[in-house]
């Protein structure tokens, strides 16, 4: 079945009311799984990349997504709890993805070999608070992979990280707390006459109000 059609059918099934929608939506087809809580695409637990003679080992990673993880980054709204992971080439990564928010979040890894991962991606998605587990096997090439949430504006607002295989080949730009942004946030102030008047009034009011409050309520 065409993968685009399959995604559409799975989404419609999830929207159907009652147990009929739930039973249809709990699907597992060609590495794609979906139920009422979330979706997994392109899971790979056993198939080795062509450049890997054997599986090197397993790496267990827990990745949490949520608003609270963005508080340490100025101007950001969403983030993962970590922004970088390093694994050995030909490793199997067992990912536990946790959504700590009451909104939809995704975890997507791009640039993977298309013969193993259709569209070159690995995808986990939760429609609200919850947890998903899935595995993928990385190629042997030293490379840095983009990890992000593709919900509109979530990556732009901070939900972006990098996965390095064998130390990676470079750092990606605009990784919160790690690398410089391509376009830095700018908050210019228009210092016109009105701005100065507001500033002066605010300073005077800030000094005067405590004085009058003290005079009235303390003395």
Image (cartoon, grey):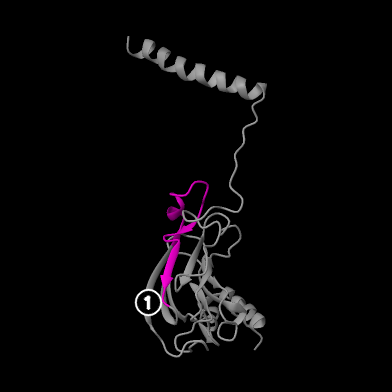
How crowded is the residue under tag 1: few (<14 C-alpha within 10 Å), some, or many (20+)?
some
Q: Which residues are magenta?
A: 65-88
Q: Is residue 81 left or right of residue 26?
A: left
Determine the residue positioned at 37% across, 75% down: 60
Q: Nearer the viewer, residue 17 or 76?
A: 76
Determine the residue positioned at 45% across, 58% down: 66
Residue most extreme to the left: 218
Could you tell me residue 37's position as x and y percent? 48, 72
Could you tell me residue 213's position as x and y percent? 40, 15
Say if the magenta span includes residue 115.
no
Q: Which corner quadrant of the image does residue 115 belong to?
A: bottom right
Question: Which quarter shows the C terminus?
Answer: top left
Could you tell me residue 11's position as x and y percent? 60, 76
Q: Please tell me whether residue 160 is drawn above or below residue 108 in the rendered image.
A: above
Q: Please tell me whether residue 178 is drawn above or below residue 50 in the rendered image.
A: above
Q: Please tell me whether residue 209 is drawn above or below residue 62 in the rendered image.
A: above
Q: Is residue 41 left or right of residue 132?
A: right
């Amino acid at each position: 079945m065409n993968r685009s059609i399959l995604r559409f059918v799975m989404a419609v099934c999830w929207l159907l009311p009652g147990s009929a929608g739930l039973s249809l939506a709990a699907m597992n087809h060609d590495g794609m799984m979906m139920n009422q809580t979330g979706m997994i695409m392109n899971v790979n637990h056993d198939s080795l990349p062509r450049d890997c003679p054997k599986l090197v080992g397993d790496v267990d990673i827990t990745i949490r997504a949520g608003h609270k993880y963005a508080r340490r980054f100025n101007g950001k709204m969403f983030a993962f709890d970590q922004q970088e992971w390093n694994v050995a080439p030909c490793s199997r990564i067992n990912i536990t993805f946790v959504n700590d928010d009451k909104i939809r979040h995704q975890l997507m890894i791009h640039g993977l070999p298309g013969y193993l991962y259709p569209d070159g991606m690995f995808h986990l998605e939760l429609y609200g608070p919850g947890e998903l587990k899935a595995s993928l096997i990385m190629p042997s090439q030293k490379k840095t992979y983009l990890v992000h949430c593709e919900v509109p504006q979530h990556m732009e607002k901070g939900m972006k990280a990098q996965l390095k295989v064998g130390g990676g080949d470079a750092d990606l730009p605009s990784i919160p707390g790690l690398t410089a942004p391509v376009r830095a946030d700018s908050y210019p102030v228009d210092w016109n006459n009105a701005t100065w008047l507001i500033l002066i009034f605010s300073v005077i009011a800030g000094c005067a109000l405590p004085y009058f409050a003290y005079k009235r309520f303390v003395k």
